[in-house]
Amino acid sequence: MTLNDDELDDALAELTTPSGPEAYHRAFGVLLHSENPAAVCAALDDYQHQEALTRFGGGNPLEPFADEVLFVARDLLSRPAEPRTHASALNVMRNLAEHEDADLIADALDGATDPDVLETGLSAASAALMGEPEPNRRLLAMLMDFVLDETRDVDERCHALSALDDVYTPDVDDVLVRASESAELDLQISAALRLSMPGRVRTHRERVERLVASWPEDAGRDTSVVREQLTGFHSLHWTDAEPADPELRAAHRELMFPAGDEACLQAFLTLLRSDDTVAVGIALDHYEHWKGLCAVLADETSAERHLPEVLARAREVLRQPPSPAELSPECGAGANHVSALNLIGARHATPSDADLVVDLLTRAATDRVLDKTIWMAYGVLDKAEAKDQRVVDALSDLLSGPWPRFSSVKEQAIRVLADSLGPQADDVLLRLVRGDDARAQAHAAYYLVGTGGLDRHRDLLVEVAESWRERSPARPWGSDVVKLVLGSLHSAYWEPLRLADPDLHRAHRELRVPTSEEAYHRALRTLLDSGDQVAVGIGLDHWWHPNGIENHFGEEARKAETPLVLDRVREALRQPPSPAELTPETGVGANRLSALTALRELGALRATGADEAALLADVLERAASDGIRWCALETVSSLFENMEEADPRLVEALGNIACDPDVRLDDRLDAIRALDASPGFNAVPELVRVTGCPEMEIQAAAAWGLRYEEIFDEHRGLLERLSANWPAEDAPWDVERVRDLLEPAVEQPGSSRTQAQ
């Protein structure tokens, strides 16, 4: 595909900042099939970038192009070596390479010296060898040579070693042994890591144990993995127990370090079918846990054909009495039940397990058994069209039983009932909400809200949430239940204050959880007309905040309250700052902050004028805190938007801030930037005055404000004198910008100040 530069630039821009799925896919295809090597590489790199992001969840949006990407990558590798294109092609082959690509990858690695080609090529080699019963001999030999080549960087040799992870042949084992004898500690550890894997550890245990004993304590993270693999996976719930019979102990050892899949499965079945409680529990643990059978079997699916027998054995165990605590001291009483329940869980439970579940819920030996039984109950209820009332009642009894005030048992029972029954769990959850256990209240309220219970039981949920005083006593799944019930916005500056007047409190509640637009407007006016400083501040916050009136009812609803809001802003700015004791979290002047932020939004709506500018100037000059001054500075620009000429009083206030050495430097610079952006020319004398400050950063920022063509020549001499006093090297950016203005060869910048505004 022949494309001009503009078309390629447009496609690259779309790849960098996608405007939508269709345009993104179209741009990717354009680049992938272009005749420009750099464009093709950009497409391949983007594909691999998207593929890498899948490890955080989600899919690759470019997955539909996988076959085309692999075709293009193969084409690039078939051409003469060029590091940039080969690196990009090999990079996508990390995930896409197939067995037939082994020779192409070997060609690319042969004689390669570019670090990117080597790094991506070794990863691609691993993909090409994965799962191949007859690995490509040429590529395999090349990788083994890499490992043993002492002239290569040790990181390259370790990377080549990792590319052999899925290859189990005698010559690879020999290379691992030779690498383990290397003087390079990193290579030695990398080899030992592979020699201690289940398929090899029986043969090489003695060698690996000698190596481990020789390593320093701080030899790296992989050494702990080697030690763990040498130990093997004993079990999950029987770590301090062993079967009584020597034959069963031998089977357990075989299960931990199998000679092969057949021997492993035979050992597993020997344990599973025995009459030894410990042996059966160990077998169940090995079937369920990711470090058990699935970790040691070359063919993980070979265990699946035994699942019916395993499940039947687990259910048989659940019908037996709980094992005594002394049989498994670490797990405690009922370890046999824990192993069986852990295996069945919610995934394998069926409605026919209801009898078992009800029995276990009423006679569980320990909290651990009870917790596992609750999850099995989840599966029983979730898969049943008609919920078994006996299971529901047994779970409900746990919420009122002789348990601690709140426990994980209650937490899980609440979740299972709510998730399985939906609104049908209301009665149980409402009992908890009406109870006196605050954590149980929070969990029950969370699940009620999740099933639409806020509409069904609003008054009760709001009453309980308000009793928590803005502090949720528990956070199910990290959620703030107060905000779920009462709305995310209490206020911006007045949280967690509660309005004492019942009418004002009800109005505040309406703003947080509106029942209708009419009621919302009525509540907002009630607060704004109340004369109560806190209520007015909360009302202003709900007017300007993104989660306030506009979020609920749109921009027009907010505009309708503009005249009243403007009056209250003026009043608040004329009042003294509210005391810090009133709002400890915000500090002094919460009333000023609410009013200033509302004023900024009023300016954006072009609802402000000279009166507001004078009030803002007064706040700037008498700011009670850095936070108030910053908020006022942020508000200035929105007022300037409504003026043809900057208000002189406001300009003077900004100049005073810029010159005040007791004000934070950042605030002084913000004041100068506000002067620079002010409409008209009233700010020019103040900018000149500010250049007289001793601080170089202040001088330079003010000098930059004199850059416009109408005023630049008049002040060139001033700028030249300032520049002469500034350091020649390591000067701030603003200094360099001003000096660039003074260069004769540079065209005068900025055009007109009027045009810039």
Image (spheres, rainbow, N blue to C red):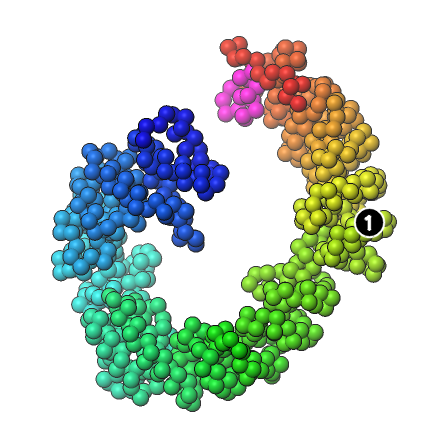
Report if residue 601 lies within the magenta region.
no
Q: In this orientation, which residue lies closer to the viewer: 191 or 644?
A: 644
Q: Residue at x 68, y 21 (%)?
A: 687
Q: Quadrant of residue 401?
A: bottom right
Residue drawn 26% across the image and 82% down it:
270
Q: Nearer the viewer, residue 105 or 232?
A: 105
- Front residue of 202/723: it is 202
Decide which of 131, 336 is in the foreground and name it: 131
The percent coordinates of residue 61 (x first, y second) are 41, 47
Residue type at tag 1: Arg
Q: Check if residue 737 falls in the magenta segment.
A: yes
- Residue 586 in view in this figure: no
Relative to 177, residue 160 above or below? above
Q: Which residues are magenta?
A: 728-741
Question: Height in image: 429 above or below 674?
Answer: below
Q: In which quadrant is the N terminus drawn?
A: top left
x, y percent for residue 514: 73, 56
* Image position of 277 with respect to 618: above or below: below
Compared with 14, 335 (above or below) is below
